[in-house]
Each structure stands twice: as structure tokens, then as C-alpha cells.
Amino acid sequence: MPDSTNPIGVFDSGVGGLSVLRAMRALMPSENIVFFGDQAHVPYGPREMSQIRDFSAGITRFLLDEGAKLIVVACNTASAAALTHLRETFPQVKFVGMEPAVKPAAETTRTGVVGVLATPTTFQGALYASVVERFAGEVTLLTNTCDGLVQQIERGDLDGARTREILESALHPMLEKNIDTVVLACTHFPFVIPLIEQIVGRDVRVIDPAPSVAKQAQRLLDAGGGLNLSAGGKVQMFTSGEAAKVESLLPKLLGETGAVSRLEWDGETRLFRP
Ligand code: DGL
């Protein structure tokens, strides 16, 4: 049984998970956290589900070896492709995953038209079909995969011409159909909220699920007596990509500085320190 000072493991295909990490740091500053970004394989969005399952299981093994007491799958795509498989493969482990925020959108929309931005895999997964079936009701959902946006955000380009172009071509047709809510169902996308708000205007609500996911992680830990009550949580950061590049993005994306260490893949299921 892990100790309460053990870290929470958090992972994503890349820097998107930092939007969830940021919310977790704000809510639970005492928690120790181990974060892994799989930059060697980003983007996950266009990949086969079976491959994303293999990566997610490999990352989970690494995080458990680091002592993780809870794992946050801070990636909608990995949650869609792998969460059920992870829960079956590691039945003793507690997982928190991302679920497209269709429920709060459907509860508050006044026009009855909601935009959802996510990767192709997220839209294809059973999880999305299930939230639509359970919560969308009479609400019309307009979807877009914002191709190329994840890569722009990985470059740290949050407001350049190409980034704006991708978002405008996704959102303008939705605005014409009278959306009043946009659901961000990819953890990379909260980093472009300022640009999205410029495009959609103030009357459209933009839903970032990160704060609710952080709360869910806190609730689970609290229920199991696993909350860390000592002060000063530390974050340890790992990437399978270029450590210096991820380090350079931290102040902008996380609002913190820190060292990032590199891990390497051995095949598709095992990570090791080179
Ligand atoms: N951040 C991810 C998500 O939440 C995935 C982006 C990608 O790698 O395609 O879906």
C-alpha cells in the first residue's frame, strides 16, 4: 500500500497533460507528482487504439515503479483508447481519466448547439459514444479534430498565424450554426483558450475539464486516506522526447520552471532511463 507522500503519476502524449498538472498543482500543492510526456510518439490522436494501449500500459508500469499511489491519465485520447484496458491490467491501481465534458455543456447550453474539439481517436472511442448517449439528449454536438493543433502547441505556438487558422476553420462554421458552448476534449487545447475566446467572443462558454479532473483525483485520494498533508509537493518531470525543449516550455505552459529528464522506449511497452 503506497504511503500518502508517494507521488501521483500523471501522463499524456506530450505537453497537454500540463494543463491538468497545472490544475492539480493549484488544488493540491502538497502532493508530490511524477509527470511523463510521451513526446517520442506525439500526436496520439491519429494512432491505432491498440498502440496507444501499449504505450499507456508501459507508461503506467514506469509510474508505478516510481511509487505512484494514483494515476491520472491526463489525455483524452489515451483515456478513450486505454482506460478500460488499464483498469483491467492493473486492478489494484486507482486511475482518473478524462471524459469529454458533454454533460456540463448539455446542462447549461441555451441555444442547444455545442462544439466539441478532440482528436480522431477520442471521437471514435466508446467513451465519447457513451457520454453522448447518456448526456447529450436533444443537444446538437458539432465536432472538429483541429488537425495540426496539437503539434502547434507542442512547439509552444499558442497564437501564431497557423494556430489561429486551424482554430478559425474549426470554430467559424460552428458559430454560424449558433454554438454557445465549446468543450475542450483534448488536454492540449486549454493552452489556446485566450485565442479561442478571441475567435468565439465573450458570449460563448469554453469548458476546460482540468479543474474537475483535479478535484476528482483529490476526492479519490481523500476517500482512500491517501492525501498528502505535509507541505511542499515536488514535481518530477520526464519525457521520451527532447528534455531541453520541454523544459523551455514549462514557464509558459505550467507557470513553473523545472528540470526534465529523458526516458527511452524499449519497443512499445517498456520505458527505461538511458
Ligand atoms: N492531449 C491529448 C488528448 O487529450 C492528445 C493529443 C495527441 O497526442 O493527439 O487527447
Image (tube, rainbow, N blue to C red):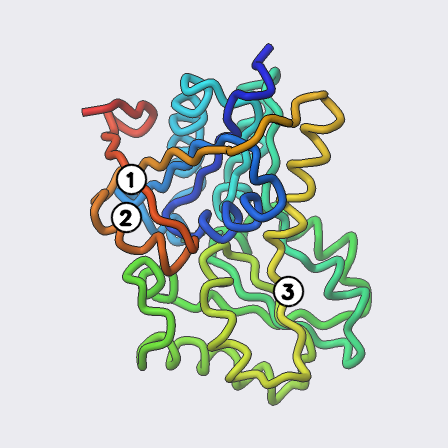
Whether pointer 1 and pointer 2 mark residues with C-beta atoms closer than 8 Å, the reply is yes
Q: Which residue does the image show at 64% across and 86% down from the upper left? A: 177
Pair 3/1: label in front: 1
Q: CA distance from mark 3 to mark 1?
A: 30 Å
Q: Where, quadrant-wise, is the N terminus in this rendering?
A: top right
Q: Is residue 155 left or right of residue 218?
A: left
For the residue marked with disc 2, what is the amino acid? Glu
Q: Which one is in front, 113 or 257?
A: 257
Q: Which residue does the image show at 44% across and 81% down from the upper left? A: 169
Q: Quadrant of residue 267?
A: top left
Q: Which residue does the image show at 43% across and 43% down from the upper left? A: 12
For the residue marked with disc 1, what is the amino acid? Ala
Q: Is residue 99 left or right of residue 266?
A: right
Mark 2 C-beta to ligand 1 under 8 Å: no
SS under mark 1 = loop
The label number, if any, that marks residue 259 in the structure image? 1
Q: CA distance from mark 3 to mark 2?
A: 27 Å
The spot of residue 256 in percent (x, y) is: 40, 50
Pair 3/2: label in front: 2
Q: Quick one: label 3 or label 2, which is nearer the N terminus?
A: 3
Residue furthest out toward the top: 1
Mark 1 C-beta to ligand 1 under 8 Å: no
Q: Quick one: label 1 or label 2, which is nearer the N terminus?
A: 2
Read off the residue under disc 3. Answer: 207
Q: Where, quadrant-wise, is the C terminus in this rendering?
A: top left
Q: Is residue 146 left or right of residue 139?
A: left
Read off the residue under disc 2. Answer: 247
Q: Which residue does the image show at 59% across and 85% down from the upper left? A: 201
For the residue marked with disc 3, what is the amino acid? Ile
